[in-house]
Amino acid sequence: MESSLLFAVPLSILPLIYGGIAFLVATRTNAPAKLTFARMVIAALPSLLMLGLFYSLVVRIYWELGTWPPSTIAWMKPNGLSPSMIGHANFVDGCFENWIIFSLIGWPVIFVLVLLIRRLRPLVGYLGVYSFSFVACLIVTQLAPTKFLDWWWD
């Protein structure tokens, strides 16, 4: 668990700052928008989807192996796991990496665009919702079994 927290905590700091800035700007702009529940769910949807993908992999690995994987990637090939299982793990890993990269690098670009385009300024609060949902998702992923997390972050 400690090793997985070493990855999750630094990944959470920047999005927390992003979210705080977004909500601060949202309260200071001339065109504040009322945050609706439906739009907040849409803003949080990428994080919810990643959480679903992550835990679907957790369950599937345990069902197929009957135990948690060792903390090396080499276990996938020699043990004769199904190609669909390996594909599932690779798909979730790729999606998770792209989601993290977008959340850390793409978010500021979109934030600047939203601030520059006057019609989009009322949406800045939803960028805060996205950032906070990213952090919440990372926290919830830490509830997975320790042996799985050790394998996942390796």
Image (spheres, helix red, strand yellow):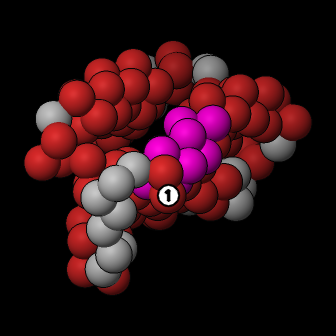
Q: Quadrant of the C terminus?
A: top right
Kindly identify the amino acid type of the residue bearing the numbered disc 1.
Thr
Q: Which of 18 and 114 is in front in this view?
A: 114
Q: Which residue is drawn at 33% across and 82% down?
A: 37
In the structure shown, which secondary structural element does the residue marked by tag 1 occupy?
helix
Q: Which quadrant would residue 111 be assigned to in this image?
A: top left
Q: Residue at x 52, y 20 (%)?
A: 73
Q: Which residue is drawn at 55% across and 40% down?
A: 21
Above or below — where is 80 with respect to 123?
above
**Magenta stretch secondary structure, dominant:** helix
Direction bottom: furthest residue: 37
Magenta range is: 17-26
The answer to whether residue 45 of the structure is visible from this angle is no
150 horizontally vs 18: left or right: right
The answer to whether residue 34 of the structure is visible from this angle is yes
Direction front: furthest residue: 30
Q: Which residue is drawn at 76% across and 48% down?
A: 146
Say few, some or many: other residues with alpha carbon within 10 Å of mark 1 (under 14 / 14 to 19 / 20 or more).
some
Residue position for label 1: 27
Residue 88 at x, y percent in the picture:
27, 43
**Residue 66 inside the magenta-drawn segment:** no
11 horizontally vs 126: left or right: right
Q: Nearer the viewer, residue 79 or 120?
A: 120
Above or below — where is 112 with respect to 65?
above
Residue 54 at x, y percent in the picture:
44, 52
Q: In which quarter of the image is the N terminus?
A: top right
Q: Which quadrant would residue 78 be assigned to in this image?
A: top left
Above or below — where is 94 with respect to 146?
above
